[in-house]
Amino acid sequence: MSAAAAVRIKAEAYALGFDLVGIARLGPMETAPAFRAWLDRGYHGTMAWIARGDGKRDDTRRVYDGAMSAIVVGMNYGGTQPAGPIARYARGRDYHDVMVDRLNALLSQIRTIAPDVRGKPYVDTGPILERDLARRAGLGWFGKNTNLINPKLGSFFFIGSLFTDLDLPPDEPFATDHCGSCTRCLAACPTDAFERPGVLDATKCISFLTIELRDAIPVPLRSRMRGLVFGCDICQEVCPWNVKFARDVTDAELQPRPDLTTVDPAELLTLSDETFRAKFRHTPVTRAKRRGLARNAAVALDQRADPAAAAALQQASSDPEPLVREHAQWVQGRMSAALPDRW
């Protein structure tokens, strides 16, 4: 298709609320060998699903016969929000739903100029190296903390893509690295999850530990969780590009809920399955399930010596879930040892 058609498609994407838009040519992915090496090191932990679909991951043209180009988008989720126990991205409506709906709307718009176009949206829903694709589309570079950084938006944005069988003129890949000698993100990580710049051991990452890990949090890491119960923004918070360029959330569907910004881990620890589902319905937090969030909340109360924490931990020490009981009892043991007169 012509350059004019590509300009029109980008304009439609911006009109739908996306903050970044670029076009990438599909094909072999540059970071595929490094990703395979990362998997071989076991840095994906228990996320067995992440290793599937290596054919599509290595060459994005294999998503479906005839796939040629991807419209890659970024959507700001608000790096200026205050820090809290729940990561910023998870404080509003589930971004998967928001972005997939809009990518499908973009596909409908494209069909007004190319009626027979085939399209497939991806938002963390398939074996696609999305950061690689976004860099190829000119949206940013890989930071030392492995996040994609855009020079005008920082890194607090979601990535999505619409694969098409259109032959669209691609944008220039983002070829330069603007991190320089800065290592603030690496130094700030409480659990030392970075093996080296650009290489994350997910098994030590607070985001993995609080969201994807279904088993017990390793004991050596529990006291380093910084009170976080779902995800972690620390390596992004200290990044100079975010300090300078992060923006407020402007999209109505991604507005953070105040009750998820100031959530109390003691309250989370006492939620039932029913109240958990009601409170977090349509948000990313449901991925952790009640047992996982309660486990995290128990650890977040470590060394918090107040009546609310004590009561929540006491209740959780007899929780129906063994995972929750064990973590609550671990915290109680530590607090009893530290404050024997109060426990």
Image: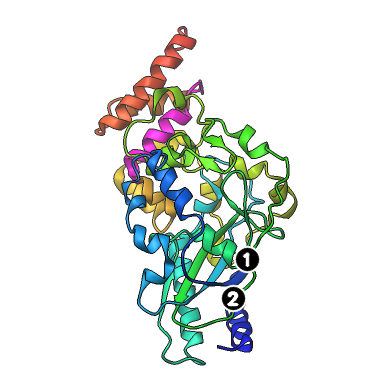
Q: Main secondary structure of the magenta part?
A: helix
Q: Return the residue at label 1.
A: 173
Q: Residue furthest right?
A: 244
Above or below, 105 against 45 in this view is: below
Where residue 230 sits in the image (x, y, percent)? Answer: 46, 42
Q: Residues within 10 Å of mark 2 (few under 14, many from 20)?
A: some
Q: Could you tell me which residue is drawn at 66 percent across and 60 percent down?
A: 175
| Frontmost residue, 99 versus 254 | 99
Asked where in the image residue 67 lies, by quadrant, the reply is bottom left
Where residue 158 sits in the image (x, y, percent)? Answer: 54, 59
Image mark for residue 126: none
User: What is the three-letter code of the residue carrying label 1?
Assistant: Pro
Above or below, 216 against 6 in this view is: above
Asked where in the image residue 183 lies, by quadrant, the reply is top right
The secondary element bearing badge 1 is classed as loop
Where residue 280 sits in the image (x, y, percent)? Answer: 41, 52
Q: Could you tell me which residue is drawn at 36 percent across and 51 percent down?
A: 50
Residue stretch in magenta? 289-306
Q: Residues within 10 Å of mark 1 (few under 14, many from 20)?
A: some
Q: Is residue 228 visible?
A: yes
Q: Return the residue at label 2.
A: 170
Q: Could you tell me which residue is drawn at 62 percent across and 55 percent down?
A: 78
The secondary element bearing badge 2 is classed as loop
Where residue 106 sits in the image (x, y, percent)? Answer: 50, 80
Q: Is residue 125 visible?
A: no
Position of 199 with respect to 154 (left or right) is: left
Above or below, 329 against 188 in this view is: above
| Frontmost residue, 300 versus 343 | 300
Does the magenta portion include 168?
Answer: no
Image quarter in which the C terminus is found: top left
Q: Could you tell me which residue is drawn at 43 percent across and 44 percent down?
A: 37
